[in-house]
Structures are given as structure tokens and as C-alpha cells.
């Protein structure tokens, strides 16, 4: 009887402490082709000083041939979330930090917490701000009679006695406070707004409501994985009521993210963005092409990323063939996101603001601005369009080239095929297809910038 009882107890122990089994009865093996990641905000907030969660947990693809290290986790998360080049990935031990520099500092690998922060930021979470002893301090720092004096102090005073390391004398000085004080207040992190004299005087009058605060859900497109980020970032923007500009399809307003939201969408130096909304008549035109406004807005962002990718490939080619110095400055496209207003459900785009006067060099119909025909900027614009045409094996070309200081925005794509086999229109309603192809290929004459890019002459 005693032996059976011992066997019963042993079985219970093995059931409690033995290896876990899944429904098939085999030992569960952790999957190594992905990691579970919870994205957090850049800065802590609230009384608990926690990092806010951004969206739900996500499966992040991880190459199982790579060793799991902090660096490989950062690289996988940066690829998956498609963050801006000015942001770096920081792996945290939890929602209250601190930053981790090795896997040993992670509590476990079930859920990995990361945040994306500006590469120029001095923000750290593992820096101790309390007085501490240096590495040469002995285990028992009280080498004189002060230890006995301290132990005989009243309890209230002992709670507020602090120690600081004197590097000159290697002694510790006690800072005595009033016996009625029991806690010390933390240094406030709030920084008062810097007001100009004009703003100060304005406060003497009733401030009229001129700007509106808009909550927008933002989606990024990752051209590397050819996917849209599944979970949007909710961001608050203060939008100017004054119209920035209006085109044939959309109107634009200046928009600035609130301080709590600015770190979520881009580098800290990007403080101003442009919010673009559809005009009423353009909505009707889009729906006539059997597209929803959401689909059309996604195509705008995808098309913009395609144009940006072409510009980056052009730069790479100039570096590899040694012509970058001769070519000079290379055009770049700004960043763009798709947005949806929380209140109205209206789809918009949010783009980095480019300050200055814009000049259009090539229209979306492929015609070049005759007034700027032989300028350096126009010749570079033509070489870029020619480059996109040759890189796509003559299937499409990026047109509607307009920029300010070699910073471009609002591209259009003309494609050889207007619709796919299912009847869906390719790219956007600005796709003029053969008209743009014909106008550009007939009128374009290759010059020095096309030669630097090793482009084939378009002469028929």
C-alpha cells in the first residue's frame, strides 16, 4: 500500500513539473520563423511612467538561420514595421523599460517589447539618475564612526539622508534635512512653452478658433515586403484652417502633430506635415473608375513609394559607376502615409512638408515645360523619367515631376497597360498611359545626364 501511495505521489509530481504537452501529446517546440513583438511609444507617459502600446502584438518574420541577438531582433523589427530611416529600434525589457543590450536582460522571449526612437535622441531608459557608488567603493562604505551615528538617527531623518560620492576625498557626506520631511520631490520634466512678445500680447485679447485638432489613423506601406502595416497608428494633428494649396483633385493644409504624437510618425526634426483631402468632384471621378476612395488613396501612397524607389536606385547607379560627383545633387522624394479621419471616416494622405516654391518641369502627359527646357533641373528631371522608363523595361514611366530644391512630391505614373485582366484600373486617375509615353519619347533628347546613367537613346 505504501509503495502504491508513493507511486501515486510521484505521478502527481511529474504531472505538475514535467514537460508540457500539446494536444497531440508531443513536446511543443517553439516556432523559430517568427517572433511576437509588441510595439511601444518612444517616450513614457502617465503616473506609472510606462511606454504606451501601439496597436496589438504582431508576428514579425525572423530568419531561423540567424542567431537571436538584440541586433538581429532590431533588424527584423525595422524591416517589418517599415520605419523611417531617421528612427532606430530599441528593445525593452517591458512596458516600463529599461533598454536591453543583450538577450540575458530580457525576462523571456514570449513577447518582445520594442520602440522606435530618433537616432539623434539622447533618451535612454537604463541610465540610473540616483546617486550611486563608483566601482572602487567597498562593500561596506562606512569606514568611520559615521555608521554608528547614522544608525542612532531618528527614523524620519534616516529616510531622507542621501549619500554622494566625493571623488576627491573618497568620503561620503550626509545631507541633513528638516526632520518633518519624509520624501523628496522628483525633478519636473515639464518645459514651459517659449512665447514671443507678439504671442504674449495676443493673450490680452480673446483668441479666435483658427486651427482644428484632428485625430487620424495612419498606415505605412512597406515596399521591401510589398505589404501594408496591419495596425494603424492613431495620431493627433493640429491642422491650419488656412488653405495651403489646391490642385485638380485635392486640397492641402498644413498639419502639425501634437507633442505626444510627433515621435510616432517620423524623426523629431519633421515637425510639419501636409494633409491632403479629396475635392468633391474628384470623388465622383474616382468612383466612376470602379475604385473606392480607400483603394485610390492606397495607390497614391504605393505610387509615391515606387517613384521614391526609382530615385534611390538612380543614386545607387551613380555611386557604382563613379558619376555621382559629375551628376551633382540627386532628387529625393518626401515620405508619405495614408490616413483616415476618425470623426468623418474620410481618407487622406499625410506627407512631409517641403518649404519653398515649387516648379513643375514635366507634366503628367509627358510634356516638358518649354520655359525651363535647358536648365540643369529640367535636364535632370528628364533623365529621371527616362531612367524609370528603361528600368521598367518600357512598361511605365514616372511623370508629373515637380520639386523644390530637388525635393519631389506628387508623382504620377503612366503605364503601358491601363487595366489588368480583371478590369481594375492601374495606378490612379492621372494615368494617361500612351499619351504620356508618346509625348515624352518623341520629344526627349538624351544629354549629359542621360549619358551618366548609361541610358539608351529613345530616338525612333
Image: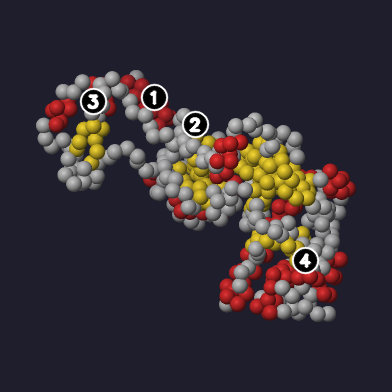
Q: CA distance from mark 2 to mark 4?
A: 51 Å
Disc 4: which residue: 362
Which residue is pictured at 56% across the width and 37% down the height?
A: 200
For mark 3, what is the residue? 158
Mark 1 or 4: the one toward you: 4
Counting residues from the N terminus, which is met first, the one under dot 3 or under dot 4? 3
User: Which residue has dot 2 on it?
Assistant: 46
Q: Quadrant of the C terminus?
A: bottom right
Per the model, the C-alpha gap separating discs 2 and 1 is 52 Å
> As rendered, which of 351 and 414 lies closer to the eye?
351
- Indicate whether 304 appears above or below 361: above
Q: Give the alpha-carbon distance from disc 3 to disc 1, as whole Å.
A: 55 Å
Disc 3 to disc 4, how far (Cα)? 76 Å
| Residues packed near mark 2 inside 10 Å, few (<14), some (14 to 19) or many (20 plus) | few
Q: Is residue 14 left or right of residue 336?
A: left
Q: Residue at x 32, y 37 (%)?
A: 130
Dot 1: element: helix
Amino acid at each position: 500500500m505504501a509503495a502504491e501511495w508513493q507511486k501515486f505521489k510521484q505521478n502527481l509530481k511529474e504531472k505538475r513539473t514535467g514537460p508540457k504537452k500539446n494536444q497531440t501529446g508531443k513536446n511543443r517546440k517553439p516556432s523559430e520563423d517568427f517572433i511576437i513583438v509588441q510595439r511601444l511609444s518612444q517616450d513614457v507617459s502617465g503616473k506609472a511612467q510606462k511606454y504606451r502600446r501601439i496597436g496589438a502584438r504582431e508576428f514579425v518574420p525572423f530568419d531561423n538561420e540567424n542567431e537571436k541577438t538584440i541586433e538581429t531582433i532590431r533588424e527584423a523589427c525595422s524591416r517589418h514595421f517599415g520605419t523611417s530611416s531617421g528612427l532606430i529600434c530599441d528593445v525593452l525589457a517591458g512596458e516600463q523599460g529599461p533598454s536591453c543590450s543583450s538577450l540575458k536582460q530580457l525576462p523571456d522571449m514570449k513577447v518582445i517589447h520594442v520602440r522606435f526612437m530618433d537616432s539623434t535622441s539622447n533618451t535612454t531608459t537604463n541610465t540610473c539618475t540616483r546617486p550611486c557608488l563608483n566601482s572602487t567603493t567597498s562593500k561596506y562604505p562606512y569606514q568611520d564612526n559615521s555608521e554608528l551615528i547614522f544608525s542612532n538617527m531618528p527614523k524620519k531623518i534616516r529616510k531622507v539622508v542621501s549619500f554622494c560620492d566625493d571623488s576627491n576625498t573618497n568620503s561620503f557626506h550626509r545631507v541633513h534635512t528638516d526632520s518633518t520631511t519624509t520624501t523628496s520631490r522628483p525633478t519636473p520634466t515639464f518645459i514651459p512653452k517659449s512665447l514671443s512678445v507678439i504671442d504674449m500680447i495676443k493673450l490680452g485679447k480673446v483668441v479666435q478658433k483658427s486651427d482644428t485638432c484632428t485625430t487620424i489613423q495612419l498606415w505605412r506601406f512597406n515596399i521591401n515586403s510589398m505589404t501594408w502595416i496591419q495596425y494603424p497608428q492613431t495620431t493627433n494633428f493640429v491642422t491650419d484652417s488656412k488653405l495651403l494649396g489646391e490642385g485638380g483633385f485635392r486640397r492641402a493644409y498644413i498639419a502639425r502633430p501634437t507633442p505626444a504624437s510627433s515621435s510616432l510618425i517620423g524623426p523629431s526634426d519633421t515637425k510639419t506635415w501636409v494633409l491632403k483631402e479629396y475635392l468633391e468632384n474628384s470623388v465622383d471621378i474616382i468612383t466612376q473608375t470602379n475604385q473606392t476612395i480607400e483603394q485610390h488613396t492606397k495607390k497614391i501612397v504605393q505610387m509615391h513609394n515606387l517613384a521614391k524607389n526609382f530615385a534611390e536606385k538612380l543614386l545607387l547607379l551613380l555611386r557604382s559607376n563613379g558619376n555621382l560627383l559629375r551628376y551633382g545633387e540627386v532628387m529625393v522624394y518626401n515620405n508619405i502615409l495614408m490616413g483616415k479621419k476618425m470623426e468623418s471616416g474620410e481618407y487622406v494622405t499625410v506627407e512631409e512638408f517641403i518649404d519653398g516654391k515649387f516648379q513643375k518641369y514635366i507634366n503628367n502627359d509627358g510634356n516638358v515645360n518649354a520655359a525651363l527646357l535647358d536648365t540643369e533641373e529640367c535636364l535632370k528631371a528628364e533623365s529621371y523619367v527616362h531612367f524609370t522608363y528603361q528600368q521598367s523595361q518600357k512598361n511605365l514611366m514616372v511623370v508629373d515631376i515637380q520639386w523644390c530644391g530637388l525635393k519631389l512630391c506628387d508623382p504620377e505614373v503612366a503605364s503601358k497597360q491601363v487595366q489588368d485582366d480583371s478590369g481594375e484600373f492601374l495606378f490612379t486617375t492621372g494615368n494617361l498611359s500612351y499619351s504620356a509615353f508618346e509625348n515624352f519619347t518623341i520629344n526627349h533628347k538624351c544629354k549629359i545626364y542621360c549619358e551618366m546613367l548609361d541610358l539608351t537613346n529613345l530616338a525612333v
